[in-house]
Image (cartoon, coloured by chain):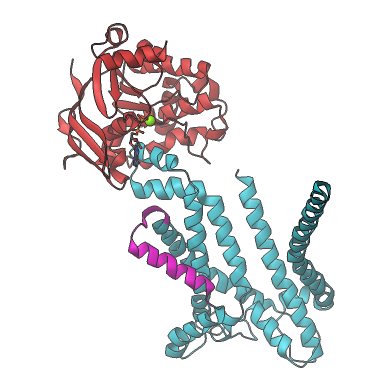
Amino acid sequence: MENVFEIHDLSSWFGENQVLKKIRMDIARYSVTSVMGPSGCGKSTFIRCLNRMHDMTPGFRLSGQILLDGVDIHSEQIDPVYLRRRVGMVFQQPNPFPRMSVFENVAVGLKLNGKAHSRADIAERVERSLVMAALWNEVKDHLDQPGISLSGGQQQRLCIARALAVEPEVLLMDEPCSALDPASTAKIEELIEDLSEKYTIAVVTHNMQQAARISDQVAFFLMGELIEMDKSGKIFTNPSDKRTEQYITGRFG
Amino acid sequence: MTGTITFRRKAVDRAMKWVFYLCAFLVVLPLFLIFFDLVIKGAKELRWSLLIDLPRPVGEPGGGIANGILGTVVITLLTMTWSVPVAIMSGIYLAEYGRGKFASAVRFAVDTLTGVPSIIMGIFAYVLLVVPMKRFSAWAGAAALSMIFIPVVVRTTEDMLRTVPTTVREAALALGITRWKATLRITVRTAWPGILTGILLAMSRIIGETAPLLFTALGNQFWQSHLDQPMAAVPLQVFTYAISPYEDWHDKAWAGALVLITMVLLINIAARVLTREKR
Ligand SMILES: Nc1ncnc2c1ncn2[C@@H]1O[C@H](COP(=O)(O)OP(=O)(O)O)[C@@H](O)[C@H]1O
Ligand SMILES: [Mg+2]
């Protein structure tokens, strides 16, 4: 299968503090990759490298290469703004834009990304995105309501719809369910499975059952290192590294 | 022993509570006294003609401050046409980009400007504009008022932008929106009620300023629509009437002051309403 991302020896630092150490990883198109590991091991730092969200962080630097369809995302050819349109992101806390309606939240990326879209085109894309995010039926009669008036789980699906509206190829999700109740979590998991038919997804999660259910491959991080990466079936039943096993068993007795 | 201590502590506690209450009461007292006093003294001259007529010479009954009201509106709008964009952009610079030495210098200068007595702004505009142009003018008045208006709005804009969570900025950038558009169309929009309140409060402040207008707009007894000519303003008329030796002018000064404080009050109420609505 063709790789969307190929990551070669990615190391990164916040000032003097090295957070990622020589990470190598391939991410196949239309696959779901779960990133796991204890708090502070660099999971967020890692996936935020993939859409260059650290560009604005003072003191951040990295070495190594991140290839997207074979092109280094830090090369001259790639404009970070354009990169982020191809590689969308959903955050840990649902963060709809305050003071924007449900509709505007989804439409804003289309309106501000420089390409001209007609009103009808925007309305159609908003609907399509909300349908894909499994939110359309719940909000279709309240599109003018503020986005932040939705429930937490709905807000997170709104954020997913907002990311989908600009038609990315890859969707990065940083613990998208950690602020949600079990029912909303289940909805989002289901959604991730559906979306993986059309998108390449990388999701950070603490929840092993979730990782086992939704992902094709699981990457286990520890203190900035990628300890092991394998098919989810293998990594949870028969991990090759002792530390992975300790982490897995440590969690569930 | 412990009983008395507990008793004393409770008594002190209660006494202090009353001190806090009393101070808070003393703070709001002047507003009520001023307004009450103005209503009583200004009521005598408060009639339609005050709002729609030109001033009349001493001794002639009637007459109003219509040209002053128009002048205040014109000078205030003139000030705001350039001050609002400049102040908001500078506030954006400080909140979103300003990290280095230059930003600290700007912040310090802006804070200092906020504390400069307003008469100095008047003198400065006089030297810079009135002297070379060889005439008093609405332009010069607006320039002096800008120096009061801008620093206030720069700082409120900065403060309000800082209340916008980082997650909002990140969400915008993650959509592939350029930074300047994300800032103007999303971050500023998020902070807008607060910024607008700051603009309205600064506006009500400059509406009442007298000193900066004394040597700039100067004042005028007639209708004046040319911006390069001396222009009337309510505070200037109040000032002229108040320092005159004539009894009927004193009454007009009170009425003018009542008009002025009503304008300020209305703007402040508007600021309240606008911020409450959008939450
Ligand atoms: N913006 C930042 N500035 C400085 N250090 C940071 C920043 N973000 C993360 N770190 C550090 O990087 C390390 C990894 O953090 P993170 O990637 O958030 O971990 P995880 O998501 O796995 O919990 C932590 O030690 C954290 O202190
Ligand atoms: Mg994290």
Q: Nearer the viewer, residue A247 or B178?
A: A247
Q: Colour of chain A?
A: red
Q: Residue furthest front?
A: B1
Quarter for ligand 2? top left
Q: Nearer the viewer, residue B87 or B223?
A: B87
Which residue appears at 29% of the width and 24% of the height?
Answer: A221
**Main secondary structure type of the part rendered in magenta:** helix
Q: Is residue A243 above or below residue B235?
A: above
The answer to whether residue B198 is left or right of residue A58 is right
Regarding residue A97, the answer to whether it shows in the image is yes
Image height of A188 relative to B30, above or below: above
Of B38 and B229, which appears nearest the observer?
Answer: B38
Q: Nearer the viewer, residue A69 or A62?
A: A62
The magenta stretch spans which residues? Answer: B95-116
Q: Is residue A177 toward the left or the right of residue A235 in the image?
A: right
- Seen at 30% across and 7% down, the residue is A233
Q: Would you say residue B114 sits in the magenta stretch? A: yes
Q: Which chain is cyan?
A: B
Q: What residue is drawn where x is 42% and y is 89%? A: B132
Q: Quadrant of residue B213?
A: bottom right
Q: Position of residue B65 (x, y in %)?
A: 70, 79
Point out residue B221 in the picture as x, y percentages from the top left corner. 65, 86
